Image: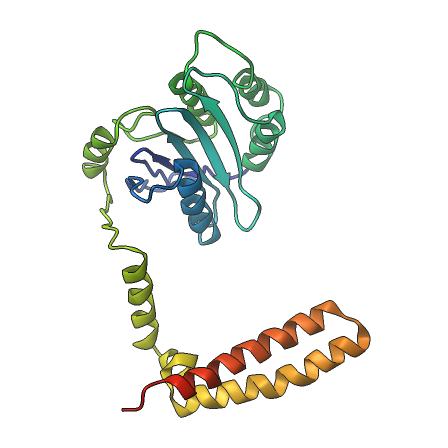
Amino acid sequence: MTPPPQVIGSTGGTSHAGPGGQRSRCRTAENITGEPVDRVLTGWATALAVGAPWPVLALWWDADRAGYILASGFRRPVGYVWLTDGTPAGEDEAMRTFAARLGLDPVLDLQSLDQLTRPDPEADARARLRGLLAVLTRAGVALPAGLSPGEPADRLREAARVQPDARQVEWAGLRDAIRAELDAVDSSRLGPWMPWSGTPRARAVALAQLAAGLPLTVRGLRRRSGGWVVAGALLLAHGGLGLVCEVVRPRD
């Protein structure tokens, strides 16, 4: 039985996690990047799925469209889109893949999902998402109270703030985020081994990578093996990067 997926959503967004009865967690996310909301949520869902033992489902909507994205491990995400008036704008195969990855009933659930891919003048995009959630409820997925598809970002944030285990994350910008991650690595046990640290350990690692990468590359070229060539090239590149960092790094 596939565990219930984690769910996130946007204009603001929702996150519901819960393999088999575990307490759910909520997050809200507002798209302030200027990127299409489905692209932003694809990145979020994929990142969460890689580090989680269950799939991640992202529900999204904006002024023109609505849809979902399912990410599971390292597999390619699958999704579906409806226009604001509910007109299907996705591929039928995506729904079948969606059902298969979540282990949904291949008859009852798939029939209900198939209805969501057919024209229906009475169903807008919000109704389509609710229909999707109705099917997923049978698989154990339920959004916390107040977090409903189509709600504006302000209402979603207010509803999410009162949920158990809710956490607010402020986005300080890409550069600041990367700098924070690098600082965290520098202060860890791995810091002295990183190419940019300029330590004797980092220099030794760079030389070892060059020494190992060169024969691997030669071996791959002789055997016409792409795998060996790539492995050797990566070692050479990483080793070369370490030595370049050593040369250009300002001296204290």
> Picture coordinates of residue 163 (x, y %)?
23, 37
Q: Nearer the viewer, residue 33 or 80?
A: 33
Q: Position of residue 43 (x, y in %)?
A: 43, 46
Q: In the rendered image of this protein, does residue 212 appear above or below residue 221?
A: below
Q: Going by the image, does 29 lie left or right of 5? A: left
Image coords of residue 244 (percent x, y): 46, 83
Q: Which image quadrant: the C terminus?
A: bottom left
Q: Residue furthest right?
A: 223
Q: Position of residue 176 (x, y in %)?
A: 27, 61
Q: For residue 91, which quarter of the picture? A: top right
Q: Residue at x 48, y 90 (%)?
A: 204
Task: Looking at the picture, tell me which residue is in the foreground, 87 or 117.
Answer: 87
- From this view, report whether residue 50 is shown above or below residue 2: below
Please say if 238 is above or below 104.
Answer: below
Residue 19 in sight in this render: no
Q: How many marks?
A: 0
- Residue 64 placement: quadrant: top left
